[in-house]
Amino acid sequence: MSDATAGECEASGLRTYAVFRSDLRIFTPKADDPDRRYTIYDPASDLSYYLGASELSIARRFDGTRSAAEISASLRSQRIAISDEKVAEFERRLFQLGLLAVPGVRATRVRDPATGISYGPLKAALSIPLVRFAPERLLDAVFARVPWLCSSVFVYSGLIVIILALVCVVSHFGAFENDVAGVYAHSWHWLLWHYPVVVASIAVHELGHALACRAYRVRITDFGIAVYLLLASGWARPLQRDWSALSQRARIVTIIMGPYASLLFVALGVGVWNWAPHESAAHTLGVVMAVSAAAALVPTLLPIFNGDTYLAITEYFGVPRLRQRAFRYVRSRLLRQPGGEAPARARRTLYWVTVVGTAVGWVMAWTWLAYGVVRLLSTM
């Protein structure tokens, strides 16, 4: 516990001690991984930390009932030579990282330095989280019961289905266009289908990423879905050390399996639209599945957003945190700050294109939001 924290507890007369957070997700090293440290994933900050087996054992002794001195005494009684000062310093470090919690004491929020620039207008205020959990058990169950989902036969068969759906829409484009206008242009009743469909499509999208990672023995630390305005956002975050160990080709495969799964969902909607009786509820559902799910896929395909295409670009150029690096470089150039990164000409061009593209993304997002609000108010 930090000195300030200890002082607060002592002044209040309460014997409150630090506790190793129960919501942290701990991943053991793989058998073939030479790095034997454990990965500690913090869902609150989306950060991962690494602790050795002995460090993790000591961290788990912070159970909220003992002080650092009592823990060090307990360790020495088990013939583990360690001083009170080292345990206290370890406690302070864990508390600063947010891995320890103290009842009644608010820890400093740790920010992920790799967090992308969020340019969705009022995203923090307008996002509604729907579900978030550790998906390992779910993925293991799905992979055990339907392993063919990750087979090449299924992937190529699904690709054929997607192509057939595209051919169906093109060959019946006039009828499809009229049905889309009839569903979306004349009322807001399509919203009754829209959100369930979009959330389902996002779940399928992220499941595509997650199952691809699972097929490559990459563990997923976090899985979630949230609604933002008319769209939904989701995430399936791989354990970074597992994902980084993959070849570039394998990483690209895990990226494209998300959009692939979304296109399968859209193809299913086209099939429902084509076969359901006209003006039936199923027919309307098919239209919304095809159009709303396709619209929900667009943001992740645009490199101005922090989606799949942006991630693929960072992989292609081999530049992690591309957007942050680009803004840092451009800011230093505009402010004529000395020092900093001195990239080659190609890298400088990439940085400037990234910054301009992100600025365009800001304008597009705000314009779209303003248009949606004005249209909504005009129909009331």
Image: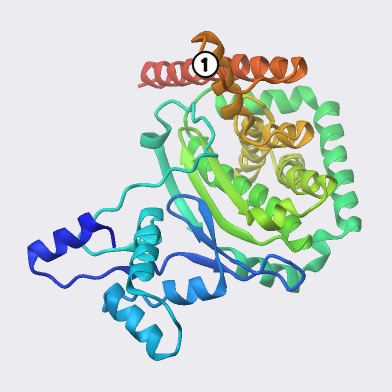
Image x and y of residue 112, in percent: 48, 43
- The residue wearing badge 1 is 331
Residue 20 in sight = no
Secondary structure of the residue carrying tag 1 is helix
Image x and y of residue 33, in percent: 73, 67
Residue 168 location, quadrant? top right
Image x and y of residue 374, in percent: 40, 16
The amino acid type of the residue labelled 1 equals: Arg
Where does the C terminus fall, quadrant-wise? top left
- Which of 309/40 is in front? 40
- Which of 131/15 is in front? 15
Image x and y of residue 177, in percent: 70, 23
User: How would you rate the neighbour count of disc 1 (Cα within 10 Å): few for under 14, some for 14-19, many for 20 or more?
Assistant: few
Q: Is residue 168 left or right of residue 12?
A: right
Where does the N terminus fall, quadrant-wise? bottom left
Label tally: 1
Residue 188 in the image: above or below residue 49? above
Q: Is residue 259 left or right of residue 222?
A: right
Residue 173 in sight = yes
The residue lying at 8 percent from left, 62 percent from top is 11
Residue 85 in the image: above or below residue 173? below
Residue 8 in the image: above or below residue 85? above
- Which of 35/45 is in front? 35
- Which of 310/103 is in front? 103
The residue lying at 56 percent from left, 19 percent from top is 339
Q: Is residue 211 left or right of residue 76?
A: right
